[in-house]
Image (cartoon, coloured by chain):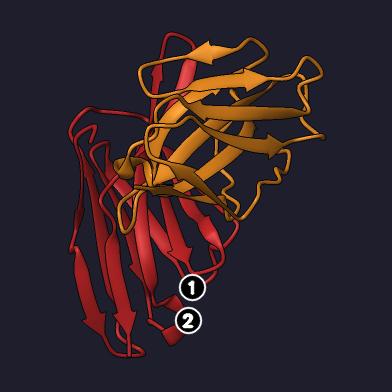
């Protein structure tokens, strides 16, 4: 699992409430990613980080913000959750070795917004 | 990143080889072909990748056509645990390396 954990694993919240999901890695990888997965869409990139305090938007970034104050943690925040943000959220890290770049994914967080 | 086209679903008998095709006709010269799979409710799992030569590892083989416009992932002896959605992705090795997932191929291994 490349030392990736996500918390919480499951969360139910109400529309309009703030939600923060945490991704934690133990191997000091530079790149980290947040994806969401919905039926019929595969995985879609929300935001990614290429270092401490360095982040950029993905294809579905509206309604989400991220922060990376230290290498091991990448936080995804929904400032005011909406029902359309009900999804499964996956965090990933990029491992670079021998000239290749693979991404390894965490176990996912299932978020339900009522 | 180049787009890929995969069949939505396939079946394979247990113990037989599973051959999963992928078309990537707009692939650029610096883009690699990656395969990931996702077993139900788990995070995607890296399988294999290649640029232009055929590749093999402990999980699978990757056959890339000479013009690089298509590829085939081969699971030589499919087991029930190989039932999953398989994603073919093409991307360059530089930059953010975002993975653009399509809807993949749902492989069902039948006993």
From the image, state the color of chain A.
Answer: red
Q: Residue at x 73, y 29 (%)?
A: B70
Quarter location, residue B79: top left
Nearer to me, B109 or A76: B109
Q: Which residue is painted at 36% across and 65% down in the image?
A: A88
Q: Residues within 10 Å of mark 2 (few under 14, many from 20)?
A: few
Q: Alpha-carbon neighbours of circle 1 within 10 Å: few (<14), some, or many (≥20)?
A: few
B34 lies left or right of A95: right
Q: Chain of mark 1?
A: A
Question: Camera-side residue: A41 or B63?
Answer: B63
Across and down, in percent, residue A54 comes to: 44, 41
Which residue is denoted by mark 1 in the rendering?
A63
Asked if residue B92 lies left or right of residue B13, the reply is right
Image hue for chain B: orange
Residue B38 % position (x, y): 39, 48
Q: Residue at x 38, y 82 (%)?
A: A80
Q: Is residue A99 above or below residue B29?
A: above
Relative to A76, residue A98 above or below = above
Looking at the rendered structure, which numbered label has been put on residue A84?
2
Image point 24% across, 56% down: which residue? A22
């Amino acid at each position: 699992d490349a030392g990736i954990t996500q918390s919480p694993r499951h969360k139910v919240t109400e529309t309009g409430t703030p939600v923060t999901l945490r991704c934690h890695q133990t191997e000091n990888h530079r790149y980290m990613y947040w994806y969401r997965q919905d039926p019929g869409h595969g995985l879609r990139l929300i935001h990614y980080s290429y270092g401490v305090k360095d982040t950029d938007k993905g294809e579905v970034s509206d309604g989400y913000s991220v922060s990376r104050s230290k290498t091991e943690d990448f936080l995804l925040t929904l400032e005011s959750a909406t029902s359309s943000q009900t999804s499964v959220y996956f965090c990933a890290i990029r491992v670079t070795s021998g000239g290749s770049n693979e991404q390894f994914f965490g176990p996912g967080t299932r978020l339900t917004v009522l | 990143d180049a787009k890929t086209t995969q069949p939505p679903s396939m079946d394979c008998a247990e113990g037989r080889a599973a051959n999963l095709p992928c078309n990537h006709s707009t692939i650029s010269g610096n883009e690699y072909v990656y395969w990931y799979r996702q077993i139900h409710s788990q995070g995607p799992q890296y399988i294999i990748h290649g640029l232009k030569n055929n590749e093999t590892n402990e999980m699978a083989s990757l056959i890339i056509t000479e013009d690089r416009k298509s590829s085939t992932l081969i699971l030589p002896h499919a087991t029930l645990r190989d039932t999953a959605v398989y994603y073919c992705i093409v991307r360059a090795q530089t930059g953010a390396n975002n993975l653009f997932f399509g809807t993949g191929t749902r492989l069902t291994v039948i006993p």
